[in-house]
């Protein structure tokens, strides 16, 4: 529901939105971040990735948020993540920014550090707030080392440098990834963060690193660049980050002057962001709407709702109510690159599109989560090659192909 003393607005997905920084989105549809796995071996954006964003840029979305770009080549989630820690790939990064924004879409780079769920490089230990393994099979093979204070200071500098380079290269701004069980999300989690210094223990201490980094990035990129944060509404784990604490974090981010908060949830152990694990209390479309409504009752900050949004009627309803300001779509863009233009024209809706295969076996949640990533990654290559309607292979073929590809890519990292 809209906040008290705030009249409902009549807003359609095609309406523009000017954010606090002054950047105007031409419409309210955003392509949310998905892991493309299309960087070069050296961390540069590949030509395939640039062509993919060119296709998405022509597809009608007002906002394009990239898949997570690593701030440190010593830690990545997939072997072909783009990394941006210095200017060695500056020209390719600029080409990437221009490809997506050429037709008027606003391009934002998501910057991230995986922390304890890093898969590589294999010759380095992952890091985390504490020396605790995650519970997910495949990500718990190596015990992380707890970050000392000197490394935390370096981490802050790396987020700032990546943000500066992104804006210099032509991106409208950056999104700091603090969700889905990556490093900043780990610091927020009472499960992953058991530190006893100023970065652990109390809720105020656990959110300190995120707030410090956001303040650092804002100071570095200035007030006219777009600064977004992706935040979990909850971890969907017993003892993890809960909704009330997340709301307090969101309100603290508003005080720092961010331009857009994207609402998400879950992590590798409870992947609510994929729909594999859902909020059992939700009564409507969209996984995280209740949280957004609760936050809107306390905040006027621009909000982006991503996850499970599938009908134009629903999008227009929640925008008109004022619950959120931007609708994020992820997986629909992996099967129809121009889904935003079709939504705006009223000729297509996400609920009619093909979806990733799943293995209907109890306990297969981690496999199904990975299966979705692999299936969509295969589709990205087809879109980059010029296809406009893709539906990907079945479950077995997807897993076999993904396993072969990951093994080959991992071997090329040394």
Image: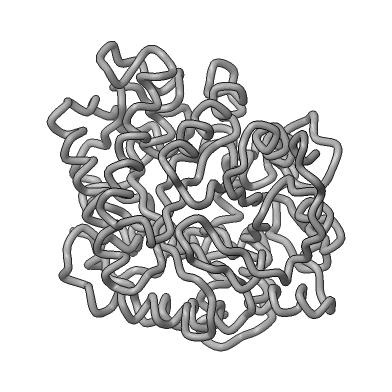
Q: Residue 408, how many percent across, how many down?
A: 34, 64
Which of these two is toward me, 45 or 21?
21
Q: Residue 356, how many percent across, how many down?
A: 68, 59
Q: Residue at x 73, y 33 (%)?
A: 279
Query: Taking 96 as reference, is 246 above or below it?
Result: above
Quarter holding the C terminus is bottom left
Q: Residue 336, how many percent across, how many down?
A: 68, 75
Q: Residue at x 31, y 66 (%)?
A: 167
Query: Taking 166 as reference, is 240 above or below it?
Result: above
**Is residue 352 toward the left or the right of residue 63 in the image?**
right
Q: Residue at x 82, y 60 (%)?
A: 311
Which colour scheme appears in the figure?
one colour
Residue lying at the far front of the rendered structure: 5
In the picture, residue 89 is in which quadrant?
bottom left
In the picture, residue 314 is in which quadrant?
bottom right
Which of these two is toward me, 180 or 165?
165
Q: Residue at x 21, y 48 (%)?
A: 158
Quarter holding the N terminus is top right
């Amino acid at each position: 529901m809209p906040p008290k003393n705030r009249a409902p607005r009549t807003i359609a997905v095609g309406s523009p939105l000017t954010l606090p920084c002054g950047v105007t989105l031409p419409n309210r549809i955003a392509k949310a971040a998905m892991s493309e796995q299309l960087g070069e071996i050296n961390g540069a954006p590949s030509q395939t990735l640039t062509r993919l964003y060119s296709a998405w840029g022509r597809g009608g979305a007002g906002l394009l948020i990239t898949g997570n770009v690593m701030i440190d080549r010593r830690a990545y989630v997939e072997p072909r993540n783009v990394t941006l820690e210095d200017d060695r790939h500056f020209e390719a990064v600029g080409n990437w920014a221009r490809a997506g924004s050429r037709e008027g879409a606003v391009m934002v780079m998501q910057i991230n550090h995986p922390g304890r769920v890093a898969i590589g490089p294999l010759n380095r230990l992952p890091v985390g707030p504490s020396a605790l393994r995650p519970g997910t099979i495949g990500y718990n093979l190596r015990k992380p080392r707890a970050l000392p204070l000197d490394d935390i200071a370096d981490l802050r500098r790396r987020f700032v440098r990546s943000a500066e380079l992104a804006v210099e290269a032509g991106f409208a701004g950056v999104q700091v990834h603090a969700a889905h069980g990556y490093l900043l999300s780990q610091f927020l989690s009472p499960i992953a963060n058991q530190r006893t210094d100023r970065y652990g223990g109390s809720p105020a201490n656990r959110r300190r690193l995120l707030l410090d980094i956001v303040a650092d990035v804002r100071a570095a990129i200035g007030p006219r660049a777009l600064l977004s944060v992706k935040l979990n509404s909850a971890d969907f784990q017993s003892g993890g980050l809960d909704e009330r604490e997340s709301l307090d974090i969101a309100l603290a981010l508003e005080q720092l002057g961010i331009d857009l908060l994207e609402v998400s949830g879950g992590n590798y152990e409870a992947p609510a962001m994929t729909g594999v694990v859902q909020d059992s209390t939700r009564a409507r479309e969209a996984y995280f709407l209740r949280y957004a409504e609760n936050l809107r009752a306390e905040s006027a900050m621009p909000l982006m709702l991503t996850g499970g949004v599938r009908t134009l009627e629903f999008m227009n309803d929640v925008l008109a109510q004022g619950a959120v300001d931007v609708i994020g779509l992820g997986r629909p863009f992996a099967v129809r690159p121009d889904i935003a233009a079709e939504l705006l024209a009223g000729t297509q809706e996400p609920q009619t599109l093909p979806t990733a295969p799943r293995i209907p076996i109890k306990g297969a949640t981690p496999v199904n989560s990975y299966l979705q990533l692999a299936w969509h990654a295969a589709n990205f290559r087809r879109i980059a090659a010029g296809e406009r309607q893709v539906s990907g292979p079945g479950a077995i073929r997807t897993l076999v192909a993904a396993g072969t590809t990951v093994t080959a890519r991992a071997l090329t990292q040394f």
